[in-house]
Each structure stands twice: as structure tokens, then as C-alpha cells.
Image: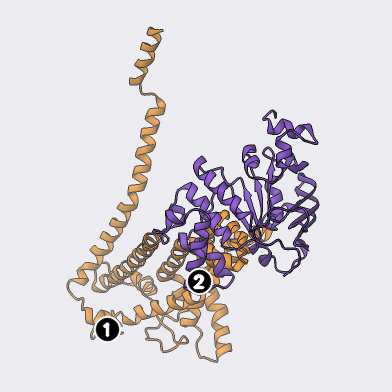
Amino acid sequence: MVAGIAPNGAEASADAPPKVVVQNLTIRYGSHVALHGLDLSVRRNEILGIIGPAGSGKTSFLRALNRMDEFIPEMEVEGRITFDGRDIRRVRNVYALRSRIGVVFPLPVGLPLTVYENVALAPRLRGVRKGSELDEIVERCLRRAALWEEVKDRLDSLGSLLSGGQQQRLTIARALSQEPDLLLLDEFSIAVDPVTTMRIEDVLKELKHEMSIVLVTNLVQQARRLADRTAFFLTGEHVETSDTARIFSGIVKDPRTHDYIEGRFG
Amino acid sequence: MTRDALARSRDFDRRGAAWYMDRAVTLFVFVGGISAILFIVGIFAFIAREGFGFVFTEFDAGEFFGSIAWRPTSMIERTYGALALIVGTASITGLAMVVSIPFSLAAAVFIGEFARGRTRETLKVLVELLAAIPSVVWGFIGLSIMNPLIIDTFGVPIGLNVLNAGVILGLMAAPIMTTIAEDALKAVPDGYREAAEALGATRWQVIRKVVIPAARNGLVAAVLLGVGRGFGETMVVLMASGHAINLPDSVFDSVRALTATIAAELGETAVGSEHYQALFTLGILLFAVTFAINLTADVIVRGIRRKGR
């Protein structure tokens, strides 16, 4: 293995080389600039919160991280993103890269498959064939997503028949089934009730011992509860990134950050 | 205030133009919807009336389904064996499906999943244009291009045969199947594709594991519509099949189809005659088979739905 990978259970550390390094990232849709000159890194075993109003380039940033921009013809990405030191533009198998990055979308996308198959899909894609092994992976991922108890008796029913909160936890279980090193969450709680949101947040706090997490959120308080560091984006500009504790105790480099977290924003 | 409310509540009984318009449109769409049932019942009643005279008198199921002797105008002994016609239709349709199903599904996947921007739009327009070519033109291609081509390529004496009619019919059915199959693929939400690609699935894995299963109902409908189209097609099979009563041993034998027989002979018969009624019996058979295909399609699609639950 590559040197410098943090052992499981390690806390976020500034010493180890970062998981992801973003340099001078600019994202355009035609003539519209969605994100301008972003420099940012994601450390190992941290939750990086990204806050900012709608249209600030948060989702575009996530898309660029696993080269999901390739589905959007007009989306152009400039700059350099490295993942474990590798330039993601230059990897020869983008599918292998994506399989190490889990994504949770704002609205749960339950694939038109059973609960079981939703979680078993990624293992199957990477070649796991044995039924017992799949069973074990499915159960483990559903347990870690705090969903197992609720669905263990209906693994064979369609994932889309679950409630909204259950579906979102199913997509988290699905992302975990990839055994990702990096988990991207895009406003995951938008269609989830507060109780379920809290349960998922607890899950994320556990997960960060094993992976890096980027949490894009509209809820400033969610970033405060979960994130080790918080980045503030505003209309395509990366205003600042700092330790969450510092930002929320009012120690900011830019007054706009303070205004935003205080809810004093236009 | 009270007076105003009183005046306004009187409006509750006043039926304005919008109310009558609503009623009129409701009635209109009801008639439109119900007319489908009226037409299907009417058509069945018509062919049944014309054909049942034969079915209940001369009809001999053993001969009709078991004999290839279709001699409706014989002076000595008229026989009505439709076996060769049934086999003719089945063999041409079968070959047509072998040609068109892989072709059209591949085309639909390419247009729906791989082609982008202008390529995609151009292809869609061209495929739809292809679907609009009249069947007599296809028949003409069968006669004047496929016929010599088959004779030269395979060294057979005649090029009007199962191969010719099947290939032409397949090419003709493919654009329609492609269009419907592509619609079915397009109806699969993009979110599914993104979610699957985010898992690290390749494009082919996404299509095979997610898109095709999600579009299965529409794809089954596309294929069965193609089958129905091939089964009922008349002009191509009349022009390209050789129109000879024959049980084919190979694709190079000429055959005759049910539809072509009706088209070629109906004009020559006296209305109400035995021959005329026998042709309508062929019509009843065609109707029954088409009905069965559609019913099967329905059952399959519903079955898939129920299984998914």
C-alpha cells in the first residue's frame, strides 16, 4: 500500500498527505462560471463541510471530484485534482476511480432494483459472485447505514417502496458497499425527516474513522455539528476554509462568512 | 358585506361558459375513448359475419390447419387447406424478427445511450423517416434489388422467397421498433444512470444492469409491436415472397402468406361465395392471432410489474 494512509480509527490529521488536493479548479457551464479558482484539500479521516447559498458551486465541485462532469456536455472543468496523489484527469480507468468514491445525492435515487440488489450491485460489478459473501456485504452495509433492522425482512422488495428517509439510508448503504475511501454527500437531508437526519449524522461520525467525507449542506448547523473543517462558497468563489470550531466561534478571515453563518445574508 | 356574500353565493347555481365547455369536452373525449371499443367490436362483427357462414358449414379444421391444398377455384374439388399460408406467414415473420430485434435494440441503445447532440438528433429523424417509407416501396426493393442479389449471391433459381421477404420485412419493422425502444430507454430517469455510474459501473454495465431492466416493459412492447407489424404486413410479403403455396424447406423456398392471399384473391371472388367466406376465415385467424399477441404482451408486461413488487 501507499505510505501515509492513515490507519483505521485515526483522527483527522494535518500531517498525513491529504486525500484530495484541488488546485486552481474552475468550472464553467458555457459562458457561466460556476466555480472560480478553487484551492482546497480534503484530509484523511475528516469531515469537510461545504456551506454556501444555492448557486455557489458546491454541487459542481462534488461532480468534478469523481469526474461526473462527463455526463454533462456543456460542463467544463479546468485545474488539477489529485486523489491519493494521482491526477484524476489522467487515470486510465475512470470506473476504477469512481468505484473508490461513494456519492449520496440530494434526493435518494433508489435504483429500480430490490433493497438487496441495490446494495449488492457495486460488489457484483467488482466481481463478487459468491452468494454468502454478497449476503455478508449487504448486511454489513445496511447495518452501518442504520437501516438493517427496518429492512431485513423485506430485502426482496423494491428499494423505491421504502420511505424517503429509508431510501436515503439505502443510498448510503449502497455507497458504503463500494468500500469507498471518499464519501461525497450532497445535501443528503433535503428529503429526510429530522430524526432520520440525526441517525444518519451519527452514522457519518462513525464512518469518518474509515474514510474522508465531503459534506455539502444547506444547513449551517449541520456543518457545525459534523464537520471538522468548514468551507464557505459564495457564487463560485471560495471565501474561506477553516476549522469549524473557529468559524463558529466567530474567528473568520472574511466578514461575509460570519454574516452567512449568522443568517444575516441577503 | 352580508349582501355581497349573498350575491356571491347565488353564483353557486350559475353555470357559465366554462362549465358547459367542461361538459362538452368531457363528452367528446368520452366518445373518443369509447370509440376504440366500438371499432374493435365492429370489425370483429364484420369479419365474423362474412366468415362464419363458411366456418359453420364447409369448414374442416383438419383440412384448414392440416392441409396445404388451398384450391378455392378448383373445378373438380375445392379445398381450403391453409397450412402452407400459416407456415408462410410464420416463417417470414420469424425471419423478420431474427433480423430486426437485434438490429433495432442495438440502434435504440446507441441512439438513446451513446449518441450525443447532433448525431443523436440526426439519427432519430432518419430512423423516423425510415419508418415512414410506404410498404409498397419496400416491396419494390425486394423485387428489383434483393431478388437479383439473392440469385447472384446464393446461386438459387429464384430470389423471391422467405429470405427476401423476411429481410425486407425485418428492415421495415426495425425503425418502428427502434423508435419505441428508444422512447422506453429515454423514459428511464437520468438519476439512475448517474447513481450507477457513481458506483463505478462502466457504460455497458449501467445499460445492462440498470437501464434495460428499468425499460423492460417498453422494450417488450416494442418487440411485440414489431411482431404484430410483421404478421399483418401485406404488400411486402405479396411482392417479395414469391407468392407460391409451398411448405418451405429452406429460406430459399418461395412461400405465400395469409395476408397476401386475402389481398390477391378477394377482388376476384363473388361477394358471399364460399371462396369469399373462406378468405374472411383467414381474416378471422389473423385477427385472433394478433389479438393473442397483444394479449400476451399485456400479460407479460403486467407479470413483470407484479413480480417487481
Query: Mark 1 falls on what kind of element?
Result: helix
Spatial CA span between label 2 and label 1: 56 Å
Q: Is residue B168 left or right of residue A259?
A: left
Q: Which residue is mark 1?
A: B66
B10 horizontally vs A181: left or right = left
Name the residue at 59% across, 53% down: A206
Is residue B196 toward the left or the right of residue B88 in the image? right
**Residue at 28% across / 79% down in the picture?**
B72
- Residue B237: which quarter of the image? bottom left
Q: Chain of mark 1?
A: B
Residue closer to the observer: B99 or A74 = A74
| Residue A105 screen position, x and y as percent | 59, 50
SS of the residue at dot 2?
helix
Contact, CB < 8 Å: mark 2 with mark 1?
no
Chain B display color: orange
Residue A39 place in picture, x, y as percent: 80, 49
Residue B133 visible in image = no
Question: Which lettered chain is shown in purple?
Answer: A
Quadrant containing the C terminus of chain A in the rendered view? top right
Residue type highlighted by circle 1: Gly
